[in-house]
Amino acid sequence: MIEINLLPEEARAKIKKEKAGVGIGPDYLIYVIPLGLLAILACVHLYLAMVSINNNAQLRLLSDRWQKLEPQRREMEEFKKEHARISGDASAIERFLQARICWAGKLDKLSSALPYGIWFSEISVSPAEFSLQGSVVSLKKEEMNLIKQFLDNLKGNADFFADFKTLELGSTQTRTLGAYEITDFAFSGALRTK
């Protein structure tokens, strides 16, 4: 469709000027866009400056608290060092106690395992070895059976035998005392080292 403008020239120019003022022209955008970006950039800088000031204030506050807690921190570090030293001592004592053999219990088990007719003449213990000497008398002439029964009783008792590597019968010797035959025996055992 073709438009024909029948207005006089003066009126035509006036309409063009009015139309030009109503819209946003490219000259206007050249100034508005950089000013808008500059305003946004200024707002971002202002926001970051406020955040930085706030963070610095918090840092100063926390630094002051840290300085006030310095004596307590020193006390805590000293306590930790002392606790570590005591714990080391306690663990060393615990290892020593675990490696220790309770001989009172072992002697009780020895007497419990003792058959009628056997008695001890000597018991000795060193850090690596246990030795026991005793004698046996039997009216039925079963001295060796009683010794074997005693040794089996000791080896069969898990609480007693737990600390031994070996427990063996050593020498036996028979002697006469009046009308009785007495057999002297010796046990030797190697102790476990922990």
Image (cartoon, rainbow, N blue to C red):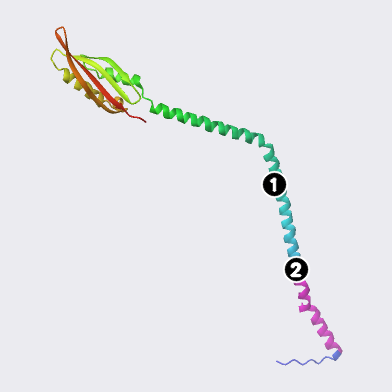
Q: Which residue is mark 2?
A: 36
Q: Mark 2 and mark 1: span between their CA atoms?
A: 35 Å
Q: Is residue 29 left or right of residue 141?
A: right
Mark in the foreground, 2 or 1: 1
Density class for disc 1 (Cα within 10 Å; few <14, some 14-19, many ≥20) is few
x then y, percent, for residue 20:
80, 81
Q: Quadrant of residue 125?
A: top left
The correct choice, above or below, for 111 with respect to 35 in the image is: above
Q: Which residue is mark 1?
A: 59
Between residues 37 and 179, which one lies in front from this camera angle? 179
Quadrant occupied by the N terminus: bottom right
The correct choice, above or below, for 107 with respect to 72 in the image is: above
Q: Which residues are magenta?
A: 10-33
Q: Is residue 177 magenta?
A: no
Residue 86 appears anywhere in the view: yes
Q: Secondary structure at mark 1?
A: helix
Between residues 162 and 144, which one lies in front from this camera angle? 144
